[in-house]
Image (spheres, grey):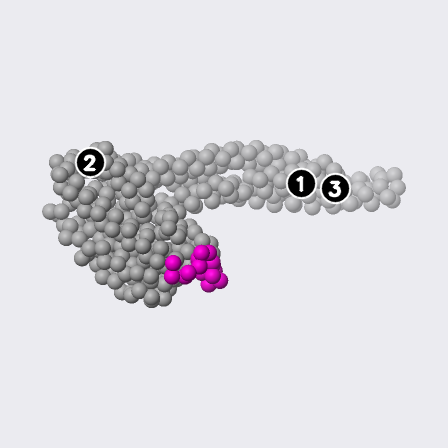
Amino acid sequence: MTENKKHIVFLVLVITLGLLSGIPVQAQNSLEKLKQKRADLEKQINYTNQLISKVSSDKKNTLYSLRLLNNKVQKRQELSATLKKEVLIISDTIDNLQIDLKKLNQRLDQLKTEYARIAEFVYKHNSPYTRLAFLFASSDINQAYQRLRYLSEISAYIRTEADRIEALEKRKGQKVVLLNSRVTEKKQLLDQEVSQLSLLELEQKRKNQLKSSLQNKESHLRSQLADQRHESSELNKKIQAIIAKAIADKNNVNYPETPAGAKLSSSFYASKGKLPWPVSNGIVSQTFGVHNHPVIKHVKIRNNGINISTSKGSDALAIFPGTVVSVVPITNTNIAVIVQHGSYFTVYSMLGRSFVRTGDKIKAGQKLGVIHTSLQGDTELHFELWKGKQFQNPASWLSTR
C-alpha cells in the first residue's frame, strides 16, 4: 500500500476514535455528581416537608417551623443552582455533539469521494484482460510482482474503506440519537428549574410571613432564648468538667497517648469527613458557630455543635466505638450522653431517655437513647464533637448527605 493510502487509513482511525468518544469523561463525571446531588437535595426537601407536616396545625407559628422553612428554602436554592449547572453541561454537550456531527459529515464526504475514485479505478482495471495487460506491460518480473501486489492491496483497501464508511454512518446515527436525547433532557431540566423557582418563591413568601408573625412574639422568644442559653451553659460546664475529670483520671500529662488511647484517637481522626450521622435520618436545622437570631434583631446565637431535626421516636446513634463517660440530666426532658473516643468526645443531648450507662463500651451505630419530642412536635438532637477541651465543627467530621 502506498504511503499516501497508509496516511489516509491512519487519519481515518484517529478521527473516528476522536469523534466517537461521546461526552468528555470529565464533563460526564461532573454531570453524574450533579445528578446525585440533585437527588440528595430532593430527598432532604421531601424529608423536611414530612417534618413540617408533623408539627400540629396550632403550633406551626414557632421558631422550630421557621428553622425548617429556612432549611427548605436553602435546599431549594441549592437545587435550583444544581439544575442550572446541569443545564450548562448539557448545553455544552449538545454544542459538542453538533460540532462532532458536522465533522463526521465532512469526513464521510471525503471518504465517499475517495472511495468512489478508487472504486472507479478498480472497476476499470480489475477485469481479467486489463489485469493481464497491466501485468504484461511490466518491464521485468519484479515489477510484475509489485503490480500484482498493488492490485491486491487496492482491492483490500476498497473493502476496508467500505467497512469504515458503514461504521461511520452507524456512529453518525448513534450521535443523532444521543443529540436528540440530550436536547430532550435539557428541556426537562429547564422545566424543573422553572418549577423549582416557582416553589422557592412560594416558600420564601411563607417564610417571611412566619417571621413577621413571630416578631409579634418577641417577649416570648426572648424568654425562650434565655432558657436555651441556660441549658447550653449548663451542658457546656458539665462537658468541660467531665472531660477534665477523664483526663485527670489518667494521671498522665501526655493523656491520652497511651497505646490504646493513641490508636483510638488516630482511628477517629482518620475517619474525619466519613463518620456516620448520629441519626438514621435527619436534616441540620441549626449549624455550628455564631449566627444572627432568625427573628430578634441584633441578637447573636452561639452553637457549639449542630442541631439535627428528625422524626418522632428517632434514636441517637453512636458515630464511633468508645466508652460512655457520663449520662447527664440537663433538664427533665434533656439528657446528654457523652462518649469518649481516645482524645475525642462526642455529645448527644436533647434525649428524652437514655439506653446506656456510664462505663458502657459501645459500638458505632449503637442506640444511645431516644430523642425528645416537644409538645410543639419538634424532635431535635443537639450534637457536639470535642477534641480534648476544644469543641469542633461536627459538619467537618460527618459524612456528606
Q: Is residue 253 visible?
A: yes
Q: Are marks 3 and 1 in contact (CB under 8 Å)?
A: no
Point out the frontmost of discs 3 and 1: 1
Q: Nearer the viewer, residue 194 or 244?
A: 244
The residue that mark 1 highlights is 10
Determine whether 240 is above or below 72 in the image: below
Q: What's the CA distance linking mark 2 and mark 3?
A: 85 Å
Q: Looking at the image, which residue is at 45% across and 42% down?
A: 30
Label annotation for residue 296: 2
Determine whether 178 is above or below 368 in the image: above
Q: Secondary structure at mark 1?
A: helix
Point out the frontmost of discs 2 and 1: 2
Task: Please check the rendered image and state whether residue 335 is part of the magenta-colored stretch, yes or no.
Answer: no
The residue that mark 3 highlights is 1
Q: Nearer the viewer, residue 264 or 105?
A: 264
Q: Which residues are magenta?
A: 248-263
Neighbourhood count class around disc 3 (C-alpha, 10 Å): few under 14, some 14–19, many 20 upward: few
